[in-house]
Image (spheres, rainbow, N blue to C red):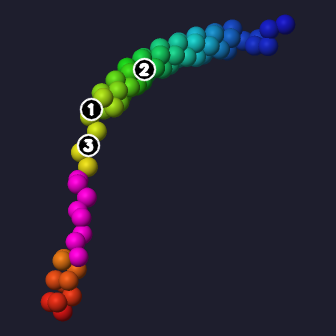
Amino acid sequence: MYPYMNEDVAFERLKDLQREMENSYLTAHTLSGFGTVVRNLSARAWHLAGLALRRPPRRRPMPRAETAYDGDAASDAA
């Protein structure tokens, strides 16, 4: 037997169920659009990371050779 004996209560329950289904449908479509945005952003980031890897390595500064003359000058000044 139907648990809601009153027709008004049954009709309200039906409207609530329809509203829940519509909200879940709208939420699902909103989240699917979010997935597309995330997919596009990740593709762009992957592309930019690839461009950053293709640049030539940076030049390293030439190491300075310390000479004995530099050390003698420092000790003479003191």
The answer to whether 13 appears left or right of 50 in the picture is: right
Q: Position of residue 17 (x, y in %)?
A: 62, 13
Amino acid under label 2? Arg
- The quadrant holding residue 18 is top right
For residue 13, the mark is none
Amino acid under label 1? Arg
22 or 55, which is in the foreground? 55
Q: Is 76 above or below relative to 2? A: below
Residue at image mark 3: 58
* C-alpha separation, residue under disc 2 versus residue under disc 1: 25 Å
Residue at image mark 2: 39
Residue at image mark 1: 55
* C-alpha separation, residue under disc 2 versus residue under disc 3: 32 Å
- Please provide the residue range marked out in magenta: 61-68
Q: Secondary structure at mark 1?
A: loop
- Cβ atoms at labels 2 and 3 below 8 Å apart: no
Q: Is 9 above or below relative to 52? A: above
Residue occupying the point 55% across, 16% down: 24
- The quadrant holding residue 56 is top left
Residue occupying the point 24% across, 64% down: 65
Q: Secondary structure at mark 2?
A: helix
Say if residue 48 shows up in the picture: no
**45 in magenta:** no
Which of the two marks, 2 or 1, is nearer to us in this view? 1
40 or 54, which is in the foreground? 54
